[in-house]
Amino acid sequence: MNSFIEIRNLNKTYRLDEVNFPVLKNLNLTLPQKKLITLMGPSGSGKSTLLNILSAIETSDSGEVYVDGDNLTGKTEKQLTLYRREKIGIVFQFFHLLSYLSALENTALPLYLNGHSKKEALHKAEEALKTVGLEHRMKFTPKELSGGEKQRVAVARAIVHKPKLILADEPTGNLDSTASDQIIKLFRNCVNDLGITVFMVTHNPEIGTIGDINLHILDGQIRNK
Protein backbone atom coordinates (compact mmCIF):
# COMPACT_ATOMS: atom_id res chain seq x y z
CA MET A 1 0.00 0.00 0.00
CA ASN A 2 1.41 3.39 -0.98
CA SER A 3 1.29 5.50 2.17
CA PHE A 4 -0.24 8.96 2.21
CA ILE A 5 -0.44 9.18 6.01
CA GLU A 6 2.25 7.34 7.93
CA ILE A 7 2.55 7.48 11.71
CA ARG A 8 5.49 5.85 13.45
CA ASN A 9 5.72 5.10 17.18
CA LEU A 10 3.58 8.09 18.16
CA ASN A 11 3.27 8.95 21.84
CA LYS A 12 1.36 11.71 23.59
CA THR A 13 0.88 12.19 27.33
CA TYR A 14 -0.97 14.98 29.11
CA ARG A 15 0.06 16.09 32.58
CA LEU A 16 -2.40 17.45 35.15
CA ASP A 17 -1.46 18.26 38.74
CA GLU A 18 1.71 16.16 38.47
CA VAL A 19 -0.27 13.17 37.21
CA ASN A 20 0.49 11.76 33.75
CA PHE A 21 -2.32 10.69 31.42
CA PRO A 22 -0.96 8.72 28.43
CA VAL A 23 -3.33 9.15 25.48
CA LEU A 24 -1.45 7.82 22.45
CA LYS A 25 0.87 4.90 23.11
CA ASN A 26 3.46 3.90 20.54
CA LEU A 27 0.81 4.26 17.83
CA ASN A 28 1.58 3.15 14.27
CA LEU A 29 -0.64 3.67 11.24
CA THR A 30 -0.30 3.68 7.46
CA LEU A 31 -3.09 4.93 5.19
CA PRO A 32 -3.39 5.38 1.40
CA GLN A 33 -4.55 8.52 -0.36
CA LYS A 34 -7.92 9.25 -1.95
CA LYS A 35 -9.90 7.27 0.62
CA LEU A 36 -12.71 8.06 3.05
CA ILE A 37 -11.38 7.02 6.46
CA THR A 38 -13.44 6.88 9.65
CA LEU A 39 -12.13 6.68 13.20
CA MET A 40 -14.23 5.70 16.21
CA GLY A 41 -13.45 5.13 19.85
CA PRO A 42 -14.71 5.83 23.37
CA SER A 43 -14.36 9.21 25.04
CA GLY A 44 -10.77 9.87 26.04
CA SER A 45 -9.36 7.28 23.64
CA GLY A 46 -7.24 9.82 21.77
CA LYS A 47 -9.38 10.51 18.68
CA SER A 48 -9.24 14.28 18.90
CA THR A 49 -5.60 14.24 19.98
CA LEU A 50 -4.65 12.25 16.90
CA LEU A 51 -6.67 14.59 14.69
CA ASN A 52 -4.99 17.61 16.28
CA ILE A 53 -1.56 16.13 15.65
CA LEU A 54 -2.41 15.42 12.01
CA SER A 55 -3.61 19.02 11.67
CA ALA A 56 -0.42 20.29 13.37
CA ILE A 57 -2.45 22.00 16.10
CA GLU A 58 -0.71 19.81 18.68
CA THR A 59 2.69 18.11 18.67
CA SER A 60 3.53 14.63 19.89
CA ASP A 61 5.96 13.78 22.68
CA SER A 62 7.79 11.35 20.41
CA GLY A 63 7.38 9.56 17.11
CA GLU A 64 7.01 10.75 13.54
CA VAL A 65 4.06 11.85 11.41
CA TYR A 66 4.23 11.95 7.61
CA VAL A 67 1.52 13.41 5.39
CA ASP A 68 2.04 13.09 1.63
CA GLY A 69 5.73 12.40 2.26
CA ASP A 70 6.09 15.52 4.40
CA ASN A 71 7.49 14.90 7.90
CA LEU A 72 5.65 17.16 10.37
CA THR A 73 8.03 16.30 13.19
CA GLY A 74 10.51 19.04 13.94
CA LYS A 75 9.00 21.63 11.62
CA THR A 76 9.02 25.26 12.68
CA GLU A 77 5.73 26.99 13.52
CA LYS A 78 5.99 28.91 10.24
CA GLN A 79 6.36 25.67 8.28
CA LEU A 80 3.42 24.12 10.14
CA THR A 81 1.28 27.17 9.41
CA LEU A 82 2.02 26.77 5.69
CA TYR A 83 1.15 23.08 5.95
CA ARG A 84 -2.22 23.93 7.51
CA ARG A 85 -2.96 26.63 4.93
CA GLU A 86 -1.93 24.70 1.84
CA LYS A 87 -2.21 20.95 2.35
CA ILE A 88 -5.19 20.39 4.66
CA GLY A 89 -8.76 21.50 5.19
CA ILE A 90 -10.51 21.16 8.55
CA VAL A 91 -14.22 20.67 9.24
CA PHE A 92 -15.35 21.09 12.86
CA GLN A 93 -18.45 19.93 14.71
CA PHE A 94 -19.48 23.49 15.54
CA PHE A 95 -18.85 24.97 12.07
CA HIS A 96 -16.65 27.91 13.22
CA LEU A 97 -18.07 30.34 10.70
CA LEU A 98 -17.70 34.08 11.26
CA SER A 99 -21.19 35.40 12.00
CA TYR A 100 -20.71 38.77 10.31
CA LEU A 101 -19.52 37.32 6.99
CA SER A 102 -21.63 35.81 4.24
CA ALA A 103 -21.30 32.18 3.18
CA LEU A 104 -19.23 33.38 0.22
CA GLU A 105 -16.90 35.44 2.39
CA ASN A 106 -16.49 32.64 4.94
CA THR A 107 -15.59 30.23 2.18
CA ALA A 108 -13.01 32.64 0.73
CA LEU A 109 -11.12 33.10 4.02
CA PRO A 110 -8.41 30.44 3.41
CA LEU A 111 -7.62 32.06 0.06
CA TYR A 112 -7.25 35.49 1.63
CA LEU A 113 -4.79 33.98 4.10
CA ASN A 114 -2.84 32.45 1.21
CA GLY A 115 -2.49 35.82 -0.49
CA HIS A 116 -5.07 35.54 -3.27
CA SER A 117 -6.66 38.72 -4.55
CA LYS A 118 -10.21 39.43 -3.41
CA LYS A 119 -11.56 38.89 -6.93
CA GLU A 120 -9.83 35.53 -7.34
CA ALA A 121 -10.74 34.40 -3.83
CA LEU A 122 -14.43 35.17 -4.28
CA HIS A 123 -14.50 33.46 -7.66
CA LYS A 124 -12.98 30.27 -6.26
CA ALA A 125 -15.28 30.47 -3.22
CA GLU A 126 -18.28 30.68 -5.53
CA GLU A 127 -17.14 27.53 -7.33
CA ALA A 128 -16.67 25.72 -4.01
CA LEU A 129 -20.16 26.68 -2.85
CA LYS A 130 -21.58 25.40 -6.12
CA THR A 131 -19.79 22.10 -5.44
CA VAL A 132 -21.66 21.74 -2.14
CA GLY A 133 -24.96 22.87 -3.63
CA LEU A 134 -25.23 26.29 -1.99
CA GLU A 135 -24.96 28.63 -4.96
CA HIS A 136 -28.38 30.02 -4.01
CA ARG A 137 -27.28 30.87 -0.44
CA MET A 138 -23.95 32.61 -1.07
CA LYS A 139 -24.98 35.99 0.33
CA PHE A 140 -26.61 34.60 3.46
CA THR A 141 -24.90 34.96 6.85
CA PRO A 142 -24.65 31.96 9.21
CA LYS A 143 -27.69 33.03 11.26
CA GLU A 144 -29.78 32.74 8.08
CA LEU A 145 -28.61 29.17 7.38
CA SER A 146 -29.71 25.84 8.79
CA GLY A 147 -27.24 23.61 10.63
CA GLY A 148 -26.78 21.44 7.57
CA GLU A 149 -26.19 24.47 5.37
CA LYS A 150 -23.62 25.85 7.80
CA GLN A 151 -21.72 22.58 7.66
CA ARG A 152 -21.85 22.58 3.87
CA VAL A 153 -20.31 26.07 3.95
CA ALA A 154 -17.63 24.64 6.25
CA VAL A 155 -16.95 21.88 3.72
CA ALA A 156 -16.74 24.46 0.93
CA ARG A 157 -14.25 26.45 3.01
CA ALA A 158 -12.23 23.28 3.58
CA ILE A 159 -11.96 22.44 -0.14
CA VAL A 160 -11.66 25.93 -1.65
CA HIS A 161 -7.85 25.84 -1.74
CA LYS A 162 -7.80 22.28 -3.14
CA PRO A 163 -6.15 20.51 -0.19
CA LYS A 164 -4.91 16.95 -0.32
CA LEU A 165 -6.41 16.06 3.07
CA ILE A 166 -9.61 16.96 4.93
CA LEU A 167 -9.67 16.36 8.67
CA ALA A 168 -13.20 16.26 10.03
CA ASP A 169 -13.93 16.28 13.77
CA GLU A 170 -17.46 14.98 14.48
CA PRO A 171 -18.79 16.79 11.37
CA THR A 172 -22.31 15.35 11.75
CA GLY A 173 -22.51 15.66 15.55
CA ASN A 174 -24.96 18.58 15.50
CA LEU A 175 -26.99 17.54 12.47
CA ASP A 176 -30.16 15.57 11.89
CA SER A 177 -30.07 12.38 9.84
CA THR A 178 -30.92 14.07 6.53
CA ALA A 179 -28.25 16.75 6.90
CA SER A 180 -25.77 14.11 8.07
CA ASP A 181 -26.38 12.06 4.95
CA GLN A 182 -25.74 15.14 2.81
CA ILE A 183 -22.41 15.80 4.52
CA ILE A 184 -21.28 12.19 4.11
CA LYS A 185 -22.24 12.36 0.44
CA LEU A 186 -20.16 15.53 0.06
CA PHE A 187 -17.17 13.81 1.65
CA ARG A 188 -17.61 10.88 -0.70
CA ASN A 189 -17.65 13.31 -3.63
CA CYS A 190 -14.49 14.94 -2.29
CA VAL A 191 -12.77 11.57 -2.48
CA ASN A 192 -14.18 10.32 -5.78
CA ASP A 193 -14.41 13.57 -7.76
CA LEU A 194 -11.70 15.78 -6.26
CA GLY A 195 -9.16 13.15 -5.20
CA ILE A 196 -9.03 14.40 -1.60
CA THR A 197 -8.33 12.06 1.31
CA VAL A 198 -10.92 12.47 4.09
CA PHE A 199 -10.09 11.46 7.68
CA MET A 200 -13.19 11.69 9.85
CA VAL A 201 -13.65 11.19 13.60
CA THR A 202 -17.17 10.20 14.61
CA HIS A 203 -19.15 8.87 17.58
CA ASN A 204 -21.94 7.60 15.32
CA PRO A 205 -21.66 3.81 14.84
CA GLU A 206 -23.51 3.95 11.53
CA ILE A 207 -21.24 6.62 10.08
CA GLY A 208 -18.25 4.77 11.47
CA THR A 209 -18.89 1.96 9.00
CA ILE A 210 -19.31 3.93 5.76
CA GLY A 211 -15.66 4.58 5.00
CA ASP A 212 -13.33 2.86 2.60
CA ILE A 213 -11.24 2.26 5.73
CA ASN A 214 -12.90 2.09 9.15
CA LEU A 215 -10.65 2.30 12.20
CA HIS A 216 -11.17 2.01 15.94
CA ILE A 217 -8.95 3.52 18.63
CA LEU A 218 -8.75 1.96 22.08
CA ASP A 219 -6.19 2.48 24.85
CA GLY A 220 -4.08 4.71 22.62
CA GLN A 221 -3.80 2.18 19.81
CA ILE A 222 -5.43 2.04 16.39
CA ARG A 223 -7.28 -1.13 15.52
CA ASN A 224 -9.08 -2.17 12.35
CA LYS A 225 -12.81 -2.60 12.91
Image: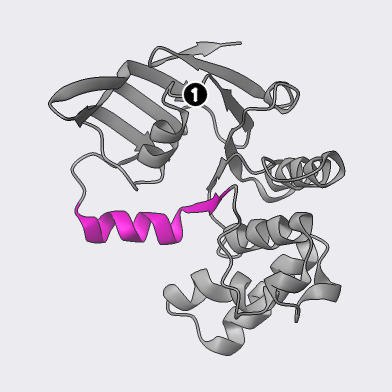
* Few, some or many residues within 10 Å of mark 1 (<14, 14–19, 20+): few
- Left or right: 3, with 176 as reference point: left
Secondary structure, mark 1, is loop
Q: Is residue 7 above or below residue 179?
A: above
Q: Could you tell me which residue is drawn at 61 percent across and 10 percent down?
A: 225
Which residue is denoted by mark 1 in the rendering?
A: 43
Q: Could you tell me which residue is drawn at 61 percent across and 29 percent down?
A: 37
**What is the count of numbered marks?**
1
Instruction: Tell which of 166 and 5 is nearer to you.
Output: 166
Work out whether residue 69 can be spotted: no
Q: Is residue 124 above or below residue 210?
A: below
Q: Is residue 152 above or below residue 174?
A: below
In percent of width and height, residue 187 lies at 71, 44
In percent of width and height, residue 155 lies at 66, 56
Q: Residue flagged by tag 1: what amino acid is it?
A: Ser
In percent of width and height, residue 53 lies at 35, 38
Work out whether residue 49 can be spotted: yes
Q: Quadrant of residue 38?
A: top right
Figure coloring: one colour
- Left or right: 11, with 126 as reference point: left
- Left or right: 28, with 109 as reference point: left
Q: Quadrant of residue 64?
A: top left
- Left or right: 164, with 5 as reference point: right
Point out the stretch of residues depicted in magenta.
76-92
- Asked if the magenta segment contains residue 181, the reply would be no
